[in-house]
Each structure stands twice: as C-alpha cells, then as structure tokens.
Amino acid sequence: MTALIPILRRHRLLGRPNRDFGRFFEDFDLPTLFSEGRGFTPAFDVSETEKELIVKAEVPGMDKKDIDISLSDGVLTVKGEKRQEREDKHEHYYTTERRYGAFSRTMPLPVEVDTNKVDATYKEGVLKITLPKSETAKAKKIEVKS
C-alpha cells in the first residue's frame, strides 16, 4: 500500500493542471479544436407505415448539393459536409471564423424497399427520405377461415 501512495499523489498533482487548462478554454467560443464535439452527427428519425419507411434528419445550414444519399444491399447511407463561415466587422476589430464538418450515417433497413421509387427532399434544414416498401415487404392481411 505504501508504494501506491506516491503514485496517487503524482496523479493528483498532474491531474489538476490538466483540468485547469481544459477549463481555461470553456469561456471562449472557440471552434471544435478545443471542444469535445468534433464535427456533428445528425440524429435520424425513422418511422414506418404500411407502405413505406420515412427517414428524417435535421441538417440545418447545409446546402442540398452537399448531401449524398445511397442505397445498396438494404443499407441506407447518408453523407454530408457542412461549411460555415462567420464574419464580424467592427470599428476596432475584425474576426472571421470558418467551421467545417463531415458526417456519414449508415443504417440497415428493416424491410426490402423499391429502390426505383425512393424520394428525397430537403426543406428548411430537414432532410426527408421516403423509401416505399417492395411488394414482398408490405404487410398482408390474412383472413382466418372457419
């Protein structure tokens, strides 16, 4: 146990400056270099109806030309790159910030879809992908006979 005490003291002594250094940057609105959230990953909302799957993703501030959607072997992949620039001009200072981030989300689909009828729209920061189910994947009602 006595051999462990110097190690614990050293750990506490080294931990404090590291913690304080990290806190120093908390008050500044610096780009992702010093923050833990590097890039972004949009959340997907997936819903299913009798006839289709609907996937929605919030990707505000993106241009539709920067979004790439593919469907292969029952796996939906959505990729994108977000570019943001901000410029502040004032009498005594001038700042420019540029932020870039790419994301890629891959999701296996729970049912077979008709790839020829997939549709995607982008409006007010929300990407909506409509994936019609194939005829074999649609639920069929079976009547019970007596």
Image (spheres, grey):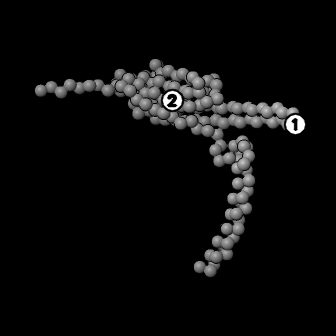
Query: In x, y percent, where is residue 99?
Result: 71, 36
Tell me where residue 63 sits by quadrant: top right
Q: Nearer the viewer, residue 48 or 135?
A: 48
Residue labelled with disc 2? 56
Q: Is residue 18 visible?
A: yes
Q: Which residue is mark 1?
A: 92
Residue at point 52%, 22% (across, down): 120
Q: Residue furthest front?
A: 91
Task: Pick the residue in front: 19 or 8.
Answer: 19
Q: Amino acid at mark 1?
A: His
Q: Is 20 situated left or right of 53 in this image? A: right
Which residue: 73% across, 62% down? 17
Q: Secondary structure at mark 2?
A: strand
User: Residue 122, which numbered label?
Assistant: none
Q: Nearer the viewer, residue 28 or 131?
A: 28
Foreground tag (2 vs 1): 1
What's the distance in space between the residues labelled 2 and 1, CA to CA? 44 Å
Residue that lies at the very extreme toward the right in this rendered image: 92
Q: Which tag, 2 or 1, sits closer to the chain's start?
A: 2
Q: Quadrant of residue 136?
A: top left
Residue 122 in picture, x, y percent from top left: 56, 23
Residue 45 location in percent, x, y?
Answer: 48, 33
Please tell me how crowded label 1 is: few (under 14), some (14-19), or many (20+) other residues with Cα within 10 Å: few
The kind of residue tagged 2 is Lys
- Residue 20, placed above or below residue 133: below
Q: Residue placed farthest to the top in the image?
A: 117
Please indicate whether residue 137 sits to the left or right of residue 2 in the image: left
Above or below, 117 against 75 in this view is: above
In the displayed structure image, the side of residue 22 where residue 142 appears, left or right: left
Left or right, 138 with reference to 3: left
Considering only vertical position in the picture, is 20 above or below 52? below
For the point 57% across and 22% down, the residue is: 123
